Amino acid sequence: MNATFQHQGAGQKIQKELLNDWYQHLEDAPSRGEKVAYLFISGNIGELLQACGLHLVYPEVNALQCGIKKVAGPNILAAEDLGYSGDVCGYVKNDIGMMLGGNKMPHGTQLPKPDLLVCNYAGCATYLRWFEALAEFYDAEMVVIDVPYLRGMGGATKEEVKYVEDQLRELVVTCERITGQEFDPAAYERAIECTVKSEDLWVQVLESAKHTPSPIDAYFEAVFFMAPIYTMRGTQGCLDYYQAVAKEVQERLDMGMGPVAEEKVRIVIEGPPAWPHFRKFWEMFKKWGAVSVASTYSKVGGIWDLGFRHDVSRPFESMAEYMLGCYTNRNWGMRSELIRGYLEDYSADALVIHSVKSCRSFSVGQADLREQFILDFEGPTLFIDIDPSYPLYFAEALVKNRIYAIFVAL
Amino acid sequence: MSRLEQLVQTARLEVEDNEFAVARAWKAEEAGRACVGYFPVYVPAEVIWAAGALPVAVWGGGDKIEVELADARIQSFICSISRSTLELGLLGKLDFLEGMLFSSLCDVARNLSGVWARNFPGTYVDYLHYPQNLKSGAARGYYRDDLERLCGEVGKLTGRTPSDADLAAAIELYEEQRRLLRELSAVRCEEPWRLSLEELQILVRAAGRRDPRRHNAVLVEVLELLPQREVRQKDGVRVVLEGSFCEQPALELLRTLDQAHCFVVDSDLGRGLRWFKEPLSRCGDPWDDLVTAYFDHAEGSVVRHHSPSERSQRLVARARESRADGVMFCTAKFCEPAFYDFVLHKQALDRAGIPYLAVEFEEKMGSFESIRTQAETFAESILFFTEEEATA
Ligand code: SF4
Ligand code: SF4
């Protein structure tokens, strides 16, 4: 690394340490008699569960790690042997396949069983089916936090917020029963305070891409940048991480440095990444000097760049608002408005829609979105479909051709 | 053609009519009437009826429609009902609907609400969120409020604000319909040769298309005629059919099962129209009655979250209650909720020693021969096994 750069890679190093620590604590939890909750990323309530003394497992994160480490294939096949159809969400099959194989992560961590399955059902109906299956296989208790899908364009209503908030308060009682320990409201508030600071920094990182050239790739890089805010929000480690990343980004801005040597095209990407082909896929864009300046997948766990922040004076209510507002819990009218806003605010030249066959929460509506943007948006709209965790689905030549066609046109 | 056959034939033509002539005619009869369509599975029809509109089940185009326009808007790996329903809309065949409702059934149904809103900007498009945390003390109140909200929205289309008495009367009407449909299903369960599965399905589905008063009268007449029907008892195996709660298999597929001597004696066909397993309990407040219906009377189905394993236990119980020899999973291609249930159900059936068969269907299927062969083999294997047991 050039001697003038002082902060590059700092975030990555911290993230690695945080994750190692996290998994170590998790693995040892049962031996300390501590309890473990499984939950989902979208609209997750990590701060609350941690203040209840629970360790957290995010099966989606495990699935994407298996995807990126290219070990998802055998897991998926194991689940299919059990009877899961080729057409269901690859993440679910990966998780169930991994469970059948002893619940060991690719890096070796032995994941503990769930003492509680918290189905924060925000935006994906598969979440319900996934934890229903785990509840059966592990014989574990399952609680649904029912988050109504938003309708209209005005955001959540008071009644919806109240409904979710009431459920969060009820959940605390369940957690107390499971852990045998009292909920610590002060710890929860401290966590929320920490969360808000991380959220501010995260938005700063995302919005740095408004700059030309963009210092970050808001899709291919952001999916790594987003990990702590979606899994460890509310911890000091998470805040440390975003402080480091903010410096890293600022330094790139100061140096005029970005993810490609020369930024030629600015794109907005909608949809989840193709994990097993992540690098290859990125290369296909880099080759054209294409940089994603905004993406929806980096908002999958929560949206802060529209102004929302957790609020320590209303810790339960603002948590409910957060859950209701996450990306897949928004209807297509809201999603397309968000994307349109990104295209404008980030001066993007093209929209890339990445459709993932087995993830209907994203994919149903994406083709219609393409229709809409072909009609309304002045730049080109590229539509690509791949499965994120199933290595066999990647038709490399086809994807390359499509990308080629659009960038030549640009 | 006997009177009974005539009644069924009329219903068949209406169920298969992608022009929805009957609903259009119903609306034209009186000023101020409206029609509100709904995508499967369930809708609180009582609320819509009380507000002066006809709830119309818009459950795909069946095998009578080619998906072309919708192809650009919903990918080919999504279930056919979502694609053909959108096709109906894009072809203008649903232009008589003032409203269209979608629900939290699955990600497809939910996201379709947004696709609909964009493609049909003049229509009232709504999304109904059915609570999934049934244990929460807040869920019933939330649902009740949402029912009232729906009522207000439909009322805007018709200009009517129904009283509690109007809603109670609507509940009465649909309770009568559900009672008649239960009776009809009981005939099928007791003597499958008296009422074919195809006929039963036609009469169930017609309930989603017709003025409930008119259809109730038809059901009453059918039930009076059925005992007099001349029939011959047939041999076959008794099966519970599961997995067709949303997209509906072609009538020919159902006919094929009867021909293969697989007698479906209980099923989730047309689930939304006969979801409640017993008469609703009534408390004097009709809104609360509808809430209780959803929370306490709904049959185990992936349409709603039940406590884990409850659904599978209910399937086993239903198989026992209907004295079924086996279970047939009849699942729409690409129907994710049904696929998830299948794994848990089959494990429960294995534990209970109940044999099962799984087949997949699409709205438009070229041939049912493969399903016929599978059903015949399944029936034979059950019969063989039963004989073996008897001689052992
Ligand atoms: S369907 Fe999509 S959003 Fe839902 S769990 Fe699977 S990958 Fe995640
Ligand atoms: S057929 Fe299945 S996937 Fe399709 S809309 Fe119905 S429930 Fe959803």
Image (cartoon, coloured by chain):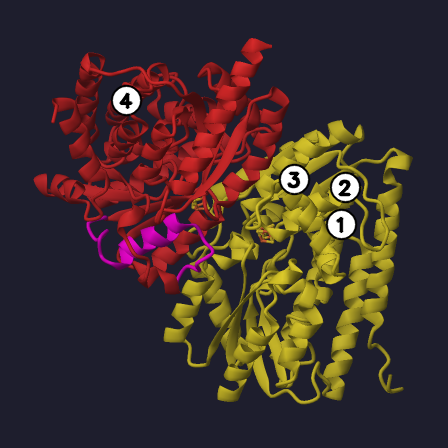
Q: Which residues are magenta?
A: B73-97
Q: CA distance from mark 2 to mark 3?
A: 37 Å
Specify the label residue B195 is tagged with: 4
User: What is the quadrant of the N terminus of chain A in the image?
Assistant: bottom right
Q: Which residue is mark 1?
A: A191
Q: Note whether residue A67 is visible.
A: yes
Please identify, in this view, whether the residue under mark 4 or under mark 1 is nearer the observer. 4
- Label 1 lies in what chain? A
In terms of sequence position, does the residue under pointer 2 or pointer 3 come before the other? 2
* Quadrant in the picture for residue B155: top left
User: Can you say whether A119 is above or below A301 in the image?
Assistant: above
Q: Are marks 2 and 1 on the same chain?
A: yes
- Label 2 lies in what chain? A
Specify the label residue A51 is tagged with: 2
Disc 1, disc 3: CB below 8 Å? no
Q: Residue drawn 21% across and 29% down?
A: B212
SS state under label 1: helix
In terms of sequence position, does the residue under pointer 1 or pointer 3 come before the other? 3
Q: Residue drawn 74% across and 46% down?
A: A98
Q: Which residue is mark 3?
A: A82
Shade of chain A as shown in the rendered figure: yellow
User: Tag 4: Cα neighbours inside 10 Å, few (<14), some, or many (≥20)?
Assistant: some
Q: Note whether residue A197 is visible.
A: no
SS state under label 3: helix
Q: Residue drawn 52% across and 15% down?
A: B387
- Label 3 lies in what chain? A
Q: Residue drawn 23% across and 26% down?
A: B166
* Quadrant in the picture for residue B120: bottom left
Which of the chains is red? B
User: Can you say whether A243 is above or below A235 in the image?
Assistant: below
Reply yes or no: does residue B94 show up in magenta. Answer: yes
Please identify, in this view, whether the residue under mark 2 or under mark 3 is nearer the observer. 3
